[in-house]
Amino acid sequence: MAIRSPQNRRMGGTRVALALGSGGARGYAHIGVIGELHDRGYEIVGIAGSSMGALVGGLQAAGALDQFADWAGTLSQRAVLRLLDPAWTGAGIFRAEKILDVVRELLGNATIETLPIPYTAVATDLIAGKSVWLQRGPLDAAIRASIAIPGMISPHILDGRVLVDGGILDPLPVAPLAGVPADLTIAVSLSGEDAAARDDGPAEPSAGAEWLNRLLRGTSALLETNAARSVLSRFGTSAEEEAVEDLTEEQDGVATASGIVPKLGGFNVMNRSIDVMQAALARHRLSAYPPDILIEVPRTAGRSLDFHRAADVIEVGRTLTARALDDYEGVAPQDEAQSTIS
């Protein structure tokens, strides 16, 4: 968490421009951020988001975030599997249209230009290789484009452009808020480091392995397609064990002269590489457009596909925001000690 020096902030201001970063299921933390801002009387007057940040931000701008949060809190691992709707062909592992159906039902026919507050969904033009700000048109289409994680969810074709996840080039979109008449700009990054945790370890390795186990077992049961069976059979009878090992962090490591080096599967190499890339891009963007408050949700708050852990991750966002606002508002130490933040 970082806060700009007091002389650069306007004390007493309550209008907030909010930049919501990308990071998969850790994006539930954005819901907690927004909840804490509302509870303290801050007014959100502008939102820009990438990927999950675009989803949460769009729902907030349309006044449907509370309903979405209630629904997300009921999801089990098996329900998440059904909603992700695994696919074995095409440009993405998951179709995710069932999730979008829920979002569309909440949004109705909302268009970005008719929202009560300015909103920007950031996507990436895969052909042109540049970031795209979606500020007009159907809200659901803008969200669909921004959450299209390459290799995971198929690209979205919009106005003749092939659009994918906004986090590829702009994981923390503060720039679209430059023209918003706000007293305070808050950016929420989902790629923060947790000093108390091992850099190479997940928050809950056993839970991640169990989730993937259910994913692989449930895929065959739910899809029951020849395509799915043929893909599994190509890897032999140990496909499940190999996939679990690949998609979850290895508990043991390789001993070297300088210590134990963690063993990483192919998925984790890719996932960690994306985290490193996005963190570097975010730092670059923040140097050009520094927010008044930067809230950093640690990677250990949840894995990218932990969509069944809404309540826990929402609470992380709320707690971090409470601490940041206490610092910003100058809460005395004795007052802070009496707060509910642990």
Image (cartoon, rainbow, N blue to C red):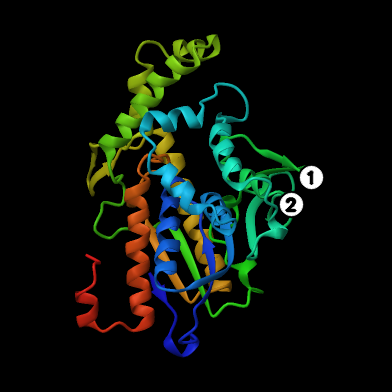
Element under disc 1: loop
Task: Say whether residue 134 is visible.
Answer: no
The location of residue 6, given as percent across then percent down, is: 43, 87
**Which image quadrant is residue 271 in?**
top left
Q: Residue 309 versus residue 294: which sits nearer the camera?
A: 309
Residue 159 is labelled as 1
The amino acid type of the residue labelled 1 equals Asp
Q: How many residues crowd mark 1 within 10 Å: few (<14), some (14–19), many (20+)?
A: few
C-alpha distance separating marks 1 and 2: 10 Å
Q: Residue at x 45, y 57 (%)?
A: 30
Q: Nearer the viewer, mark 1 or mark 2?
A: 2
Q: Residue at x 50, y 16 (%)?
A: 223
Q: Residue at x 38, y 44 (%)?
A: 73
Element under disc 2: loop
The amino acid type of the residue labelled 2 equals Gly
Left or right of 116? Residue 13 is left
Left or right of 131? Residue 240 is left
Left or right of 121? Residue 297 is left
Screen quadrant of the C terminus:
bottom left
Q: Residue 93 versus residue 274: which sits nearer the camera?
A: 93
The location of residue 141, given as percent across then percent down, is: 67, 45
For mark 2, what is the residue? Answer: 137
Q: Is residue 199 above or below residue 8?
A: above
The location of residue 265, given as percent across then percent down, is: 37, 34
Q: Residue 130 versus residue 79: which sits nearer the camera?
A: 79
The location of residue 51, given as percent across then percent down, is: 55, 49
In this view, the residue farthest toward the bottom is: 7
Task: Say whether residue 187 is visible.
Answer: yes
Q: Residue at x 40, y 58 (%)?
A: 32
Screen quadrant of the N terminus:
bottom left
Circles 1 and 2, Cβ within 8 Å, touching? The answer is yes
